[in-house]
Image (tube, helix red, strand yellow):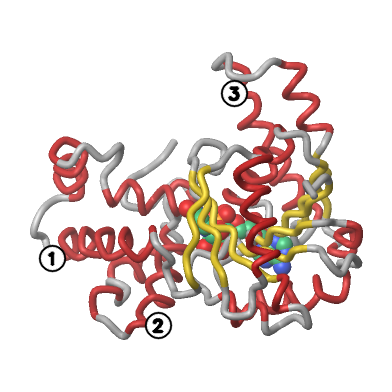
Amino acid sequence: MAFERIGIVGGGQMGAGIAEVSAKAGVDVIVREINDDLADAARARVVKSLNRAVERGKLTADDRDAALGRIRFLSELDAMADRQLVIEAAVENEAIKAEIFGSLDRIVAADDAILASNTSSIPLTRIGRATNRPQSVVGMHFFNPATVMPLVEIVHSVATSEATATRAAAFASETLGKVVVHAKDRAGFIVNLLLCPYIFEAIRMCESGFATKEDIDAAMVNGANYPMGPLALSDLIGNDTMLAVAESLHAEYGDARYAPPPLLRRMVEAGMLGRKTGRGFYEYG
Ligand code: NAD
């Protein structure tokens, strides 16, 4: 059964992107934010992205309007009652996610609805524990920007049923056209477990004065053929998200490679979150 009605909790970078991809695929979408102003901001994020696609000739104005017409942006979580799939993409904070899933468990009516999280590093088992239906809780880990990046990691907790994982994977691959890989519920899954130590090492290099941020990024772009350097990538992902991921990885494995570099922590404390706040390792207009 394909999903016709989905919900997204959190309309930040990731939530807005997942909403856009889904609406373009013809799905009816509700995006829930904390309040009406943030719901408006989520809408503005999607409008900006769709307009950019039209300007670049990747989307017609009619298709943009149709996609936008399929998304409602609001602040009432109760609106999720009739959803067949809800993808949570709120901040990377276990207590907040647990509260959201506890509420979704009470609100989402269909027994066979799927409750997914886009978490980068929080164990799905712990998120599922906040519900009375852990078999229906699964990770759907999209990549940033979700409108462009092909991958979705489907993360199976110890309690996730095969049917849940199969249906979530089918939505990602068949409805959204994404490339799907499967991973067990260990912090970082496949991509972040490989990618994050690399980014943290680059931050430590920058912090120790070993090389400048520009040289570190230029080295990896020109020497390893990466599309962007590790510090620019941390700014793109969000330095607050990187810090949260570091804390989860370090708590899970206890390995110094995953410990949050102090510079990353100081930058987050200073509000230098990267592109989303206009300043991180670099400044953005
Ligand atoms: P973001 O800060 O851009 O957006 C988070 C949004 O969640 C904010 O708009 C905030 O207002 C909203 N929010 C917080 N609590 C909420 C609640 N109770 N109900 C509804 N909305 C709420 O962060 P993001 O980069 O979009 O990350 C969101 C999630 O996606 C995190 O779990 C993160 O780990 C994961 N993720 C991020 C990336 C990335 O590259 N940024 C990639 C994959 C996964």
Mark 3 → mark 1, Cα distance in angstroms? 41 Å
Q: What element carries label 3?
A: helix
Tell which of 220 and 76 is nearer to you. Answer: 220
Nearest to N terminus: mark 2 or mark 1: 1
Mark 3 → mark 2, Cα distance in angstroms? 40 Å
Q: Which amino acid does label 1 sit on?
A: Ser
Tell which of 155 and 56 is nearer to you. Answer: 155
Horizontally, residue 111 falls left or right of residue 92, namely: right
> Which residue matches tag 1?
208
- Which numbered marker is on residue 53? 3
- Which numbered marker is on residue 252? 2
Name the residue at 57% across, 80% down.
158
Q: Is mark 1 within 8 Å of ligand 1?
A: no
- Which one is in front in this view, the residue at disc 2 or the one at disc 1? 2
Q: What residue type is labelled 3?
A: Ala
Residue found at the very far left of the displayed protein: 210
Q: Does the residue labelled 2 lie within 8 Å of ligand 1?
A: no
Q: Is the residue 78 above or below the residue 150 in the image?
A: below
Nearest to N terminus: mark 3 or mark 2: 3
Q: Which amino acid does label 2 sit on?
A: Glu
- Which one is in front in this view, the residue at disc 3 or the one at disc 2? 2
- Which numbered marker is on residue 277? none
Name the residue at 49% across, 50% down.
277
Tell which of 94 and 151 is nearer to you. Answer: 151
Instruction: Indicate the quadrant of ligand 1 in the picture.
Output: bottom right
Q: Are marks 3 and 1 in contact (CB under 8 Å)?
A: no
Q: What element carries label 1?
A: helix
